[in-house]
Amino acid sequence: MAQQLLWIEACLKLVGGLALVTAPRGLARLLGLPSADDRFWPRLLGGVLIGLAAASLIEGRNPGAGGLGLAGSIAVNLAGAAVIGALLILHRAGNTKRGRLLLCLVVALLMVLSLVEIAHADLFRAIRASVGSEQQASVSSMTTQRPVDLDRIRPWRRACWSSRACGC
């Protein structure tokens, strides 16, 4: 299921990236979104989306190959949904009703896709495992502490610790 989700991620990002790289103004006009005077930034975003799609494809084909993976896709989707949602709330995106509706649908799609990926990812198991290994490492480091330098301790404590008569 994880590979299928990565393929869906890759397809969505690749389509959006190619559309932004090839026709940023026409796409903005078609979707009812604000058009940038300079086409550099939309094309740069398109290139980033194509790169994210490639990373998802790498991980989808060869799990563990070092591609984006589900955890990275979840982070990218939630960040994108947060930014678009904030722009919608602040009335900085979507000059037309069609544009605002499209952006609301994009936010909803990103949130649903993220929730499905979270449900199918071993993300929480990996986090629990890393926390567990850190706790084990801290316990093992406590058992392998270096011996106490008795010369640096006050004389009365040195006498107490060396005799162990007081039980401390």
Image (cartoon, grey):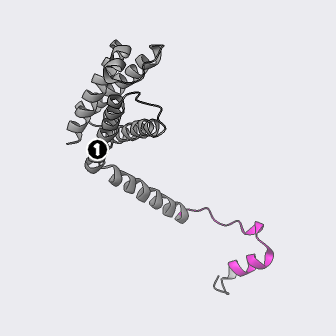
Viewer-nearest residue: 147 or 113: 113
Instruction: State yes or no: residue 156 in magenta.
Output: yes
Q: Which residue is mark 1?
A: 112
- Classify residue 155 as left or right of residue 100: right
Above or below, 118 relative to 162: above
Q: Residue at x 43, y 37 (%)?
A: 88
Q: Mark 1: give few (<14), some (14-19) or many (20+) Cα within 10 Å.
A: some
Residue 27 makes an appearance in the image: yes
**In the image, is residue 12 above or below residue 72?**
above
Amino acid at pointer 1: Val
Q: Residue most toward the front?
A: 97
**Which quarter of the picture shows residue 166?**
bottom right
Residue farthest to the right?
Answer: 155
Q: Residue furthest bottom?
A: 166
| Image height of 73 relative to 52, above or below | below
Quadrant the N terminus occupies: top left
Q: Residue at x 38, y 20 (%)?
A: 46
Nearer to me, 131 or 30: 30
Tell me the residue at 27%/29% (across/down): 12
Res 48 quadrant in image: top left
Q: Which residues are magenta?
A: 144-161
Give the image location of residue 111, x and y in percent. 33, 43
**Quarter of the image with the C terminus in it:** bottom right
Where is residue 82? Give x, y as percent: 43, 40
Q: Total of numbered circles in the picture?
A: 1
Q: Residue 81 lies in magenta, yes or no? A: no
Q: Residue at x 30, y 31 (%)?
A: 56
Q: Secondary structure at mark 1?
A: helix
Q: Is residue 167 left or right of residue 20?
A: right
Can you give x and y, in whole percent of width and height, for residue 62 in the image? 25, 32
Q: Is residue 66 visible?
A: no
